[in-house]
Image (cartoon, coloured by chain):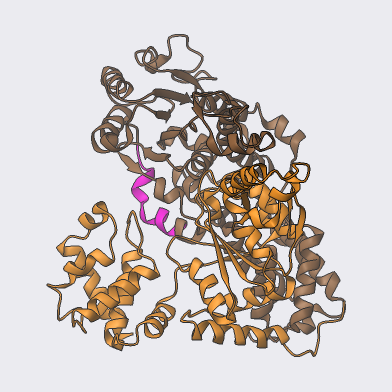
Amino acid sequence: MSEATGPLLAPNPAERLLAFSDFLRRNGYRISLHESLTGLRALDACGLPSLADAKTVLKVVMCRGADDWSRFEALFHAFWTVSGGTVETDAVSGKKTTQKRGGARGTLIGLAGESTEREDGPWREGGGAGRNKSIGRTDFRFLTDPRDMRSAMLVAETIARRIRRRRQRRQRAVRRAQRIHIRRTIRRNLAYGGEPFVLIGREPREKPLRLVVVLDVSHSMTRYNVFLARFVRALALTFRNAEAFAFHVDLNRITELFRITSPEELRRRLERRANLWFGGTRIAASLRELADRHGHKLFRRDTVVLVISDGYDTENAQDLEKVVAGIRSRVRRVIWADPMRGFGGPGGDQEDGGPLAGVLPILDWWGPADTLQSLEALADYLARA
Amino acid sequence: MTVIEGRTGMTGDRAEEIQGMLSRAGYVADRPLALALTLQEILDRPLLLEGDAGVGKTAVAQALADGLNCRLIRLQCYEGLDTNTAVYEWNYQHQLMTIRLQESAGRPTDRLEQDIFAERFLLRRPLLEAISQPEPPILLIDEIDRADEEFEAFLLEVLSDYQITIPELGSVKARSIPRVVLTSNGMRDLSDALRRRCLYFFLDYPSPQREREIIEARLPGVGRRLAGQVVAFVQTLRGMELRKVPGIAETLDWAAALAGMGIDDLLAARERVPDTFVCLIKTQEDRHRLGAETVDRLLEAARAGAEV
């Protein structure tokens, strides 16, 4: 691209750039007037010898994260090169967005950010607190409007991230302690000539949550995992000690996938690991594999194991009971989030827990994970666990 | 705002200068990165560099400091980092000793507080040190994603005003505005407020061509054939499911180790190659994945890649 940007921006560069900002905003970028003005200032400072440089300048100013970064080239190309900067803002973003029903594969690749837009058309930003409130009680399966889905995904991530802040807040509230905090005590008593009249205590910092999340990615969970995978990814990003696994008929460690910052790289890896999203469910075998292969590293007295599954299993329920009991004896908590609990599915609204009946007495917590509100309840528990 | 037409590319020229300067400092930067650093200079904004571990984010700041011949002040972030470690701390032992000495000398105590909260009792930590420099330094805030949200919020204030308030002394304004480079490995999501204040650049793993240039620039003793093979091998390795994907530092270490062992052709020394994986593979799990067959496949990729 050696074409100069001057003719494209003429006759009114500010107007053209604001149109581009608006175009980006409609494609999910969070751009305020400040960024638009900064972009204009940056372009003005350059004199811009080429379109390629203009792209870099605007990319650096207008992107806020890896997801924005990876999508920018295509959007820039669509706006400036294909249409010469005259594209109607709705022409690209207005493409009908439908949630792909291609199974968990689509779900997980959607985490990479770009592919969702590529295949289904870009998301539009929408909502706000009121909108989020209205979708808070909606079952994930019935969220089909792209704007609602986008909002729900963001809220699910926020809920996961807030757990850490809440745990830290609790730590700060603890003040009285057996041990003296020498530095603060001296500082506090300087006014008394260093005589320690007022003692300041020190309480050990509470250790961060050591979390092991096991996510069921079998076919029956597909519609829920659009949101739950986002939630789990945010947990993996928020807690350094978190480990994430996905299972259907066997278990796969996905922590490193969730920690990849480059959406391109994440997509490449997910494409290669096609075995992540096939088939039925073997919960007991998967959990046994977790205990046998990873237990010696992950299971400690401060570990919380979170299983997110609807309880469908092609195996003997007694096996599951045995395996969960074995894990429970090695960790601090085993909790189970069941998306079908709120409905009439297996385990759903059944007092005996349906296929999970035998496991319930062993679990420390068993709750739904089918709405944002239920994720809040799960977050509440994790903040205190 | 002037109409952008028919003007010379000032920033473009400066970007070329920065690219050359970084190159002389041993950092092979592509044009987009040089442009981003130029914009940082023009707009006086912090630059947030994000990318996987080992892609050379920290090295950008180091090379920039070398190239601009200015001081590099580094703040390594970690969980629990607080203002006492990042901004300033009073030298309490020194203050106490002064109190005792003044008391024993029978000096009046009414001015004592004023005396002991003087600048000479102040221990400057990286942030305060950076804004106190007469010449703008490079302030590297490394791995900001490891710090707590509270510290991130505090940093917002510093990065917007370049001013730090010390209750006992008042506000300390920056003598010069440092060039701030923040790095993040994506261990946790950063706040939107912090991202808004920064220019953003995503640093990815280098292309084969760029990685070969890096080896040639940093390790002139490594032959072209070996450099090409090493790059092709590592690029293929990065595509595998590894727990710790080798970064540029690992590529350089490995190339240096191979050259040090007198190997100038990976394929000719295929029996000795696994002995050098200690430079490239950093976990036992990943080492197990590199069985003989996999290594053969990677060597074949190296042969094909080096021929391109």
Horizontal side of B99 relative to A32 (left or right) equals left
Occupied quadrant, residue B159 = bottom right
Q: Position of residue B49 (x, y in %)?
A: 57, 64
Q: Residue at x 72, y 52 (%)?
A: B157
Q: Main secondary structure of the magenta part?
A: helix
Q: Is residue B84 left or right of residue A32?
A: left
Q: Residue furthest toward the left?
A: B271
Residue B285 versus residue B134 in the image, above or below: above
**Magenta region:** A267-279
Is A351 drawn above or below residue B207 in the view shown? above
Question: Is residue A86 visible in this depiction of the protein?
Answer: no
Query: Considering only vertical position in the picture, is B178 above or below B244?
Result: below
> Which one is nearer the viewer's eye here, A280 or A208?
A208
Which residue is at 41% across, 14% downward? Answer: A354
The quadrant of the rendering that contains the N terminus of chain A is bottom right
**Residue at image location 45% in from the left, 67% down from the top:** B55
Residue A37 percent coordinates (x, y): 81, 67
Instruction: Classify residue A305 as left or right of residue A384.
Output: left
* Residue A276, magenta (yes or no): yes
The answer, for residue A163, to whether it is visible in the render is yes
Q: Position of residue B259 (x, y in %)?
A: 24, 81
Query: Which shade is chain A?
Result: brown
Q: Which chain is orange?
A: B
